Image (cartoon, helix red, strand yellow):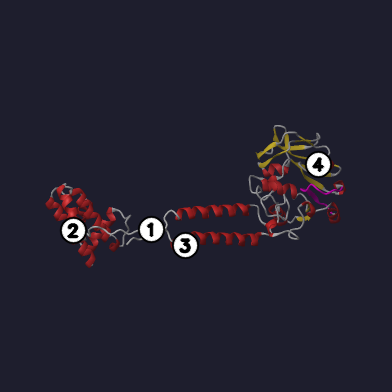
Amino acid sequence: MTTSTSPTTRGIWRSLRAPLLVGVLLLVAATIGVLLSGGAREARYLDPDDTSLSGGKALAQLLRARGVTVDRVDSVDAAMRLGGDRLILVTGNVYHDDLNRLSGDLLIDAASVYLEDLASEVRRGLDGARVRSREPECDLPAARAAGSVFLGGSPLSGPSRSVGCYPSPDGATLLTYAVSGRNVTVVGDMQFMTNMRLDEDGNAALALNLAGSKSAVTWLVNPPSEEGGAVGGDKSIYDLMSPNVGWGVVMALIALLVTIVWRARRLGPVVVEKLPVVVRAAESVEGHGGLYRARRARDRASAALRAGTLARVVPRLGLTVDSGADAVVSAIAVRTGQDPHLVGAALYGPPPADDGALVGLAGYLDQLERQISER
């Protein structure tokens, strides 16, 4: 009679059910994550309501904590309705309107398409300066108080009355001057004001000093139509998914395939072979003892006796296998009343010099073990 060793359907299912269950759980978790986060809005650069790394929510909250009124507007008409003595912070680029109608100090990104309209006396360099930590090297109080700031971008030059700070080889990366009763400040790159960069160097101090120079800030951002429209509407769930969801699903599938290959290397139950001879434990011990005696391996025999004794008595003493020799010897001596020197020599001493000493060592270790068990 022969027994088939080919994998059965039941065996294959038992082997693959664990990785398949893991894969299903990963897909369910990914789907739940998409449903819970599908309505998240896309990042909007330096928007005071945006909490992404490129947003400006952190700066807006700091300004409000200092008592500065922050009004987010997306059109010149909305900014005109606010009125009052305000700082105009221009971070958006698409208004299709005349920003010169706005009154008040200006804080502008040098990359803005309205730079020539709002700061006609400022010129941008052709080569951009690397964004890095820079020292102010100017007398502007707002910059000197902030110290080093993460700045770069377009190098700037302006009229003779202007003050340039945070210089690069081709010009300043922050420029400020007064014209027609207003202060105009142009920054080569406004990344230092974003949520990601605000806590580096003196970025927060400079951003607060510039944007908080007035009691109110009119924060101009791109209109909704230029941000891809309102979230929701006719968009499908796939439009609302984060771009990283696809990579997450791919990685989960790869992990599932690797697990399947790993588990499929051994299909079917383990084959149990009948041993030709069954050897009793006592005979095995006697056989080992005979081999040790024939080879005069008293060092190995004594090491085996000591290791076995320690493995059995150490847990009974409330110690761990990592306990040092001194701790074990002290605990045994206290428990049994034996001389610590004799205990240490028996457990950690040199190998016996002859067979008689080996037999004596075995007897002493057996005596120690019995005393520990009885107490």
> In this image, 241 relative to 3: left or right?
right
Rendered image quadrant of residue 334: bottom left
Visible residue check, residue 329: no
Residue with the most extreme bottom position:
374
Which residue carries the number 1 mark?
5
The magenta stretch spans residue 134: no
Q: Earlier in the sequence, mark 1 or mark 2?
A: 1
> In this image, 139 relative to 269: left or right?
right
The residue nearer to you, when weighing 146 against 60, is 60
Label 1 to label 2, Cα distance in Å?
35 Å
Answer above or below: position of 143 versus 370.
Answer: above
Query: x and y percent of residue 156 in the render?
Result: 76, 36
Cβ–Cβ under 8 Å for marks 4 and 3: no
Which residue carries the number 4 mark?
115
Which residue carries the number 3 mark?
13
Query: x and y percent of residue 131 in the render?
Result: 67, 39
The three-letter amino acid code for the residue at tag 1 is: Thr
Q: Earlier in the sequence, mark 4 or mark 1?
A: 1
Which residue carries the number 2 mark?
283
Q: Secondary structure at mark 4?
A: helix
Q: Earlier in the sequence, mark 4 or mark 2?
A: 4
Query: x and y percent of residue 11 in the render?
Result: 43, 61
Cβ–Cβ under 8 Å for marks 4 and 1: no
> In this image, 76 relative to 110: left or right?
right
